[in-house]
Amino acid sequence: MVRAIPLYTLEGVTGAEKSYHYFSTGDGLGLSLQRFNRAPSDDIVLIVHGLTTSTDMFVMPEHYNLVQYLLDHGFSDVFTVDYRMSNRWIYNLERHRYTMDDIALYDFPAALQKLREVAGDRRVHVICHCLGSVSFLMSMAAGQVGGISSVIANSAGLTPKVPAFSRFKGTLGPTLFEHVLGLPYVSPAWSEDPGFHRGKLISKLVSLFHRECDVPACHMLSLMWGSGWPALYLHENLDEVTHRRGGDLYGPVNVHYHRHVMRMLKARNRAVKFDRDAPQHASLPNDYVRAARDLTTPILFVSGDTNRVFSDSNRHCHNVLERSSPGLHSYHEFPGYGHQDVFMGKDVAKDIFPTFVDWMNDHRHPAPV
């Protein structure tokens, strides 16, 4: 396969010193921060990807990407984190039982500790996406991370909601893939694998039901997430290069995280602990929404108005938290956008990112203790 854009390239970010900073979690995983530093700053931005993506979604060279935009608009020290949901980690190809409780308890506290070791005690603003957003807000609600000046949470927060067909897929999919088909993960790039195997057959079958484009990875992504043709984004928002390299930008995903999402949906769309009896998670709340009533960090909940993955989750989350903390948080909806194209669309530097910068500029003050 000849790639139009190299895998794991950093060519999309210029005018900054780039460095990796590795750290370990309390349950024994190696993770990493990537730093893009142009100049010293009192305000640092930490960017968090979603499930099946990675740092790559924020440094794409085919459009004016988020890291470059922040560096050019007053935020000169930017970090991205590849936590355990990142497609850069090979253990996502194994059958594991990690949940968002593990991420809230182990990943983000260790990431923030490492960030402050590297950059010092600065104000930290967080931009998070998808299940990375859910997990990070869980960590905040549980008191595992603190001292955050502001948060921007895209698509889903502490009250995930999904379309009916997604709920149906989430109910049957994990058991079907793991126990019936014997596949520990689902990959959008199965069609590009050499030879023939079960995954490649699944990809071909899925493509029979998706005639909206000729990109098999796009079809598989609509199977993996959301309900639509396509589900993750609006085609017209993507550069065609982005559209065709979906197999690189979104990696294989273990299906167990879907079980945690389903547990939340069954709890009336509330972020809850996956297993209340798990001793390693005893310090976490059973109900993260209830715990979030005490949050003092302002959160901007954002979503595209055509979100076919988490529907109106963030509008609902804002409304719920508004009742306990009137005026602290905000909600903003982007017309003509979906779930993933809020970060990966070709015109996001014009349509989306100015809203992010305005929010963080409004909160450039000492973080709450």
Image (cartoon, helix red, strand yellow):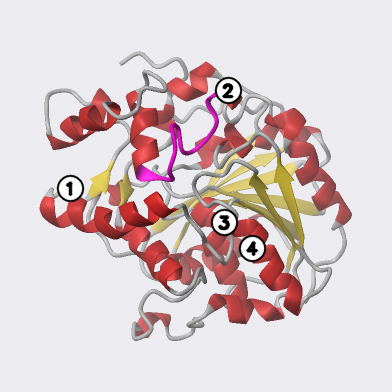
Q: Residues within 10 Å of mark 3 (few under 14, many from 20)?
A: many
Across and down, in percent, residue 58 comes to: 59, 37
Query: Mark 1 — residue?
Result: 183
Q: Residue at x 43, y 43 (%)?
A: 227
231 magenta-colored: yes
Query: Measured from the top left, where is residue 346 in percent x and y?
Result: 63, 24
Q: Front-most of 45 and 231?
A: 231
Query: Are the two marked residues, 1 and 4, in contact with CB atoms closer than 8 angstroms?
Result: no
Highlighted magenta segment, given as a residue range = 224-235
On the question of residue 313 being in view, the answer is yes
Q: Residue 156: give its label.
A: 3
Q: Residue at x 68, y 50 (%)?
A: 302
Q: Secondary structure at mark 1?
A: loop
Q: Residue at x 20, y 50 (%)?
A: 177
Question: The disc labelled 4 sits on which kind of residue?
Answer: His
Main SS, magenta residues: loop
In this figure, which residue is indicated by the disc labeled 2? 236
Q: Which residue is mark 4?
A: 316
Q: Is 238 in front, or is 283?
A: 238
Residue 51, placed above or below residue 243: below
The answer to whether residue 99 is seen in the rendering is: no
* x then y, percent, for residue 366: 85, 66
Q: CA distance from mark 3 to mark 2?
A: 23 Å
